Amino acid sequence: MILAASLLLTAWFAATPGLAQDAGAIAFAENVSSEVVNILEDGTKSQDDKLQAIATLLDEHVDFDLVGKLVLGSHWRDATEEQRQEYLSLFRELVLANISRQLSFYSGQEFEILDAQTLSDRDTMVKTRVEAPSGNVYRVDWRVRHEGDNFSVIDVIGEGISLVVTQRSEVGETVNRRGMDGLLASMREKAEFTVID
Amino acid sequence: MTEIGYCAGRRRCSQILLAALLWLPATGMVSAGMALAQSESELRDPLEPVNRVVFQFNQVVDGLVLKPVAQLYNFALPQFARTGVRNFLDNLRSPVIFANDLLQGEDERAGTTLGRFMINSTLGVFGVWDLATRLGYEKHYEDFGQTLAIYGVQPGPYLVLPILGPSTPRDATGFAVDALVLDPVPYFITDEEQWIRYGTELIATRAELLPATDDLEANSLDLYVSYRTVFWQRRQSEIRNGSAPQDTAYEDIFSDDSFDDPVSSDETP
């Protein structure tokens, strides 16, 4: 009976690829967020160890190279090979630095997955709700890309504000005004204030 | 501004912080999702040279006056007192939210707003205690700028207003209509009380935005552009009542796969 039900369910998922993809994306989001919490609430780790562990975790689950390229958009094609490499490495560094800065404010937020929405044959938006101890509630959505058996985060939208859209505007404007080298110079300058590898 | 809520009917509400939350202030909770180049939904900025001057002026005033006062406010008042002030101010705003719920044809949300106002004005001690949220009537905001957007009025170009900050002709109009036409509160209080109310609203709002603006300043490559895109993304999200971006310009960003000439995501040279 259970076997029949699960076969039926599998057949149903197979017939509706969006649902299988969404279920996978939800499981992925639950998994990543519980790993993050495990690290943060691990009393045996120093703050630096925690940040290092988070960085490793994010490298595994966030497609920094793809996000970086999406942010650079059409300027990617005009960049030289060296510029591309330096850009991607600075982009990852700045995002990680920013995250570790935020980490210092962690104070036991509660988190709930609301639902998921199929955006395309590979992208799902996982919708979540985060409640801070102060009672403030934030809507946070994750855009999760599904390729083969692999899921990765490619955008995060907090209270309607997309990381990719925001970065694209800033990066695009900087390249338009100061060129690719000007962008890299600004990013280097930002990175100097941060200590993470 | 964010909704204050209560984790009711949670399916899974564990003690968790997301990696996503960490990114949230980076992208700025300040204000909404499509100031993209070559898209229809882009917020045009033909007045950029003038806007940048007003923006600089605002930054100076903010640094000299608003921000220090907001910091003092956060320092002097404990969290529960600040929550009480926010609840009181929002309760006074209920008639405007109710009117705009109705004008947008959102009957259910109008009912929620009315119920909240009745409960909080009485049992909630003049609105200081948000009992209604605990009873399941969650807070939401509406304004006449959003109502105009629902009616199909175009936003017009980006405007940076002195002191008030990022806006558009549509939102500035909405702001004036809310304050001068839809708001009944001025009929019941003196002008002086009215100015105290506006002043407190300005300081409390600035104080609530401190973490977000600090983050934006720490991370931005071009603060003027960051404020513009974050304002516009937030605004679009408010008009959609909180749902994720749904426009084609946003989807187009992710459908473009033409990156894999020399470098592709899985073969790092």
Image: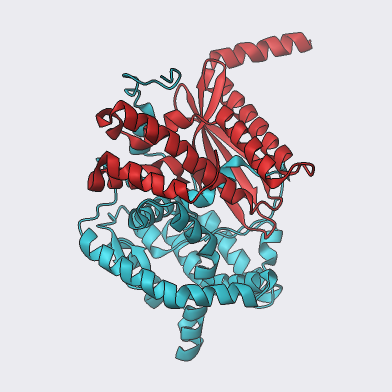
Chain colours: A red, B cyan
Q: Position of residue A139 (x, y in %)?
A: 56, 48
Viewer-closest of A161 and B90: A161
Viewer-closest of A15 and A63: A63
Answer yes or no: is residue A8 visible. Answer: yes
Residue A5 image-quadrant placement: top right
Count of labels shown? Answer: 0
Q: Position of residue A145 (x, y in %)?
A: 50, 26
Q: Position of residue B63 (x, y in %)?
A: 43, 72
Instruction: Give the left or right position of residue B40, taking residue A41 as reference.
Output: left
Q: Position of residue B133 (x, y in %)?
A: 66, 60
Whether A92 is drawn above or below B97: the answer is: above
Instruction: Give the left or right position of residue A141, taking residue A77 as reference.
Output: right
Q: Residue at x 44, y 29 (%)?
A: A65
Q: Residue at x 79, y 10 (%)?
A: A1
Residue B112 image-quadrant placement: bottom right
Whether B181 is drawn above or below A77: the answer is: below
Answer yes or no: is residue B240 visible. Answer: no
Whether A78 is drawn above or below B261: the answer is: below
